[in-house]
């Protein structure tokens, strides 16, 4: 640390806090001194680290009595200043002596409520246009963390009414179980026969993990999303027949985690539309060019991967570029790819600098996408950032709302995360979830080549939206089950048939793989497995003796508002895991490893060597070397652990 | 603006929902006990309701932080304690030591900073307040806040790099 950089302006600038009147002069100095730019980057890294270190849940709530007293006040006409004196002064005097006895309330659902209210409350959230001014104006920046995503439409409706909105929510089974995105535990089939979730084809969590391992650090447990690990890999499941959008592929094998249990794989293979007639593409890139993007693995990587991508597009396809930083603006109006030079020139001119204001940029990007809308084509805003949104949370939820609204007009969002730590990963995932978009993390030119090259069509062409899966377990054959991963994709059972409830989109040729661990019923145990008086006497339906479960899939074709449903049964039986398909073995190995990183207790005695052995046995077909890379990463992570002597 | 208009009531309720958690978290660091912190936060909301909506609307967050801060200082004074914000609740014993090793170390270093350094650091990096908002809460000058944050971050960086070398 050089003494010459002991200057508070550097820190203020790095944090986007340098007063405007000082910025211009400072930026001149900065231009002359590359070392100082490094210092700025270091401070930004440190700031991210500090935010992470100081992250602490703000779950504490007022007691019901306290809350009631506060709300009660809004029901009466108020007498401004006097009203404050009456209440405030006496209670100051007794402070410290009064112990509030609060009713035991499980608050976990309240945060969800808050999210919903916050997302939905009409009139409370600025209109999207004003969101763009948030960073300059004095509007409040909310510190509330909006990371939970469980959707409960009924609560949202109730929350619109002011008088009801403070009613204590009844804690539901789901929210308690999934609180804090901990790995899911087993659920009893007799009480919870249905498991419902939105699909997830994002891969960011795995790519982010790879970056960390390559840097020699182990990823924090909460950065791991098991389903994104599993879905990172290519599984060439059989394509759907005829005009079908999806093929459901299932497999049952013995569980490596607990003897006697089974693993059920439920996979979807989406139709591959690449061979069909070329779809017109209208892409608007929204690029973060703030100071923090200047690192080699961010903006320069992005620019070079975009240049490569252009070669994969047709001459009629259109590209536009909007940037955002301290100010935002259109760098390249929507331009057909046949004017390639113009596009390349615009890319070469991109420079990073200044602080971030995503709000104004995102509006400009959507506007451009809509002005150049290609009917029945691909219309997409592609946001590339390291996640430093310099807008208040109010504005963030505006962004989420905006993205969701635009998805209804068939303009979808892709989020490309660059070079960041796990910082704002939750925010990016949230935005892309709500926008029914996809989210990829680009840590290297190899990954850029995958997302914007080899899998470009999967990234850009949506074959189905609001893709929801529901699994109904047969109580005759399954005592309990747990879904591995997908914690933040859980849906309420009733939302499955509700076409108004959003879910994820799936791109051309994408695969989605989900794994369940199930505990089979022992013979003769089935009807006694429930302790419920009435349930016990219920006649279990006749037939379907050999079925383990029924998979139900709902999705909408792009542009449709009504969903279609397909169903398929999975029969009991199954093979030993070592006899299972390579895809099955690989996905189980990957899920095991993700669970290990998450310290999931359900993993049982499985250790790294067993995971490696399983993965080794599953790489007979590995055209892109991804499975081998996984094996290397697992070995490398074990070395990192060993180095730190913290391997159990 | 009509008093008790629907919009105003909803706005107010939203502030309560949004900010009660962070305010309790912050105030607890000053009072070091939850019941008092909740009490103070409740009072700050009652006080907020008595304000002119149009006037506080744009800086409600620093306004509430400031009310809680003053109120907590009053309580501390009565208890004969100094105004000092502590992270002790964050350095919780239940954290598995091997996971949180580095995090804990940084928290310990922050705990060793001067109280003013510590407070601006918390307001900036935990509560996400801007310099300007911190100015509204603490009534320190904006450039003073800039210097404090700069110094605090530098001290921590020095400590951590020494740690890594040894």
Image (cartoon, rainbow, N blue to C red):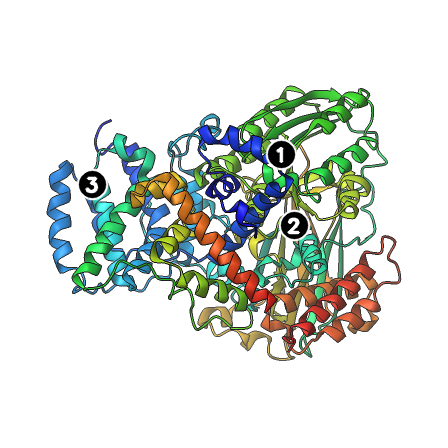
Q: Which chain carries label 3?
A: A
Q: Residues within 10 Å of mark 1 (few under 14, many from 20)?
A: few
Return the disc, 2 or 1, that comes first in the chain's sequence: 1
Q: Residue at x 43, y 67 (%)?
A: B91
Question: What is the x, y in percent for residue A346?
Answer: 72, 25
Q: Which of A118 and A215 is in front in this view?
A: A215
Q: Which of A197 and A344 is in front in this view?
A: A344
Label 2 SS: loop
Question: Would you say A418 lies left or right of A40 here?
Answer: right
Per the image, the residue denoted by label 3 is A75
Q: How crowded is mark 2: few (under 14 residues within 10 Å), some or many (20 or more)?
A: many
**Residues tagged by mark 1 and mark 3 found on one chain of the structure:** yes
Q: Mark 1 lies on which chain?
A: A
Question: What is the x, y in percent for residue A619?
Answer: 85, 63
Residue A497 can be seen, yes or no: no
Question: In this rendering, is residue A553 above or below A590?
Answer: above
Return the disc, 1 or 3, that comes first in the chain's sequence: 1
Per the image, the residue denoted by label 2 is A200
Q: Quadrant of the C terminus of chain A?
A: bottom right
Per the image, the residue denoted by label 1 is A32
Question: What is the x, y in percent for residue A115?
Answer: 44, 46
Quarter holding residue A498: top right
Label 3 SS: helix
Question: Would you say A608 lies left or right of B97 here?
Answer: right
């Amino acid at each position: 640390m050089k003494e010459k950089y002991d200057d508070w302006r550097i820190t203020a600038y790095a944090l986007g806090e340098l007063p405007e009147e000082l910025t211009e002069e400072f930026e001149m100095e900065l231009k002359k001194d590359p070392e100082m730019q490094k210092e700025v980057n270091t401070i930004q890294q440190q700031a991210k680290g500090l935010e992470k270190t100081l992250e602490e849940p703000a779950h504490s709530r007022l007691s019901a009595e306290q809350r009631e007293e506060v709300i009660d006040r809004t029901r009466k006409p108020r007498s401004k200043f006097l009203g404050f004196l009456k209440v405030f002064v006496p209670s100051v005097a007794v402070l410290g002596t009064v112990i509030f006895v609060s009713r035991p309330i499980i608050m976990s659902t309240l945060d969800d409520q808050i999210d919903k209210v916050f997302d939905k409350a009409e009139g409370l959230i600025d209109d999207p246009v004003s969101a763009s001014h948030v960073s300059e104006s004095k509007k409040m920046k909310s510190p509330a963390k909006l990371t939970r995503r469980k959707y409960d439409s009924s609560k949202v409706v109730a929350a619109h009414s002011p008088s009801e909105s403070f009613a204590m929510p009844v804690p539901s089974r789901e929210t308690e179980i999934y609180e804090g995105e901990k790995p899911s535990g087993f659920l009893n089939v007799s009480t919870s026969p249905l498991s419902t979730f939105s699909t997830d084809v994002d891969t960011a969590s795995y790519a982010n993990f790879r970056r960390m391992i390559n840097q020699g650090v182990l990823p924090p447990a909460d950065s791991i999303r098991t389903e994104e690990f599993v879905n990172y890999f290519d599984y060439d499941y059989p394509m759907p027949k005829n005009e079908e959008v999806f093929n459901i592929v299932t497999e049952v094998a013995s569980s490596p985690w607990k003897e006697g249990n089974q693993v059920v794989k439920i996979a979807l293979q989406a139709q591959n539309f690449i061979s069909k007639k070329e779809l017109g593409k209208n892409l608007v890139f929204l690029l973060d060019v703030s100071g923090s993007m200047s690192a080699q693995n961010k903006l320069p990587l992005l620019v070079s991967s975009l240049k490569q991508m252009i070669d994969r597009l047709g001459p009629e396809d259109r590209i536009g570029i909007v940037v955002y930083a301290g100010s935002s603006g259109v760098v390249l109006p929507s331009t057909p790819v046949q004017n390639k030079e113009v596009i390349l020139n615009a890319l070469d001119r991109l420079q990073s600098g200044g602080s971030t204001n995503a709000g104004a940029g995102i509006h400009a990007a959507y506007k451009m996408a809509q002005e150049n809308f290609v009917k029945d084509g691909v219309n997409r805003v592609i946001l590339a950032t390291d996640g430093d949104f310099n807008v208040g949370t109010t504005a963030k939820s505006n962004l989420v709302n905006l993205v969701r609204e635009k998805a209804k007009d068939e303009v979808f969002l892709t989020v490309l995360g660059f070079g960041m730590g796990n910082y704002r990963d939750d925010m990016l995932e949230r935005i892309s979830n709500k926008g029914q978009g996809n989210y990829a993390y680009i840590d290297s030119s190899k990954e850029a080549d995958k997302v914007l090259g080899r899998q470009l069509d999967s990234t850009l062409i949506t074959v189905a939206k609001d893709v929801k899966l529901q699994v109904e377990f047969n109580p005759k054959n399954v005592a309990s089950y747990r879904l591995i991963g997908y914690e933040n994709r859980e849906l309420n059972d009733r939302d499955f048939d509700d076409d108004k409830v959003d879910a994820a989109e799936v791109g051309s040729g994408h695969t989605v793989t989900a794994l369940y661990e199930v505990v089979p019923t022992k013979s003769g145990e089935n009807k006694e497995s429930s302790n419920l008086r009435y349930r016990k006497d219920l006649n279990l339906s006749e037939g379907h003796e050999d079925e383990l479960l029924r998979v139900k899939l709902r999705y909408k074709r792009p542009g449709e508002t009504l969903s279609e449903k397909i169903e398929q049964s999975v029969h009991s039986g199954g093979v030993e895991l070592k006899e299972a398909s390579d895809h099955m073995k690989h996905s189980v190995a990957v899920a095991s490893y993700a669970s290990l990183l998450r310290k999931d207790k359900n993993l049982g005695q499985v250790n790294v060597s067993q995971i490696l052995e399983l993965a080794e046995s599953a790489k007979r077909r590995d055209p892109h070397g991804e499975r081998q890379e996984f094996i290397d990463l697992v070995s490398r992570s074990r070395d990192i652990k060993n180095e730190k002597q913290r391997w159990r | 603006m009509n008093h008790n208009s629907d919009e105003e009531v909803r706005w107010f309720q939203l502030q309560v929902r949004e900010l009660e958690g962070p305010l309790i978290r912050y105030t607890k660091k000053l009072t070091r006990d939850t019941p008092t912190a909740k009490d103070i936060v409740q009072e700050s909301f009652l006080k907020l309701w008595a304000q002119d909506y149009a006037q506080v609307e744009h800086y409600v967050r620093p306004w509430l932080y400031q009310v809680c801060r003053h109120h907590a200082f009053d309580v501390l004074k009565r208890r004969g304690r100094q105004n000092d914000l502590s992270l002790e609740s964050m350095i919780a014993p239940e954290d598995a030591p091997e996971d949180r090793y580095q995090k804990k170390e940084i928290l310990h270093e922050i705990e060793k900073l001067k109280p003013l350094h510590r407070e601006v650091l918390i307001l900036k990096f935990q509560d996400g307040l801007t310099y300007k908002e911190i100015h509204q809460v603490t009534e320190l000058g904006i450039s003073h806040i800039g210097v404090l944050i700069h110094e605090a971050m530098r001290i921590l960086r020095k400590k951590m790099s020494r740690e890594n070398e040894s």
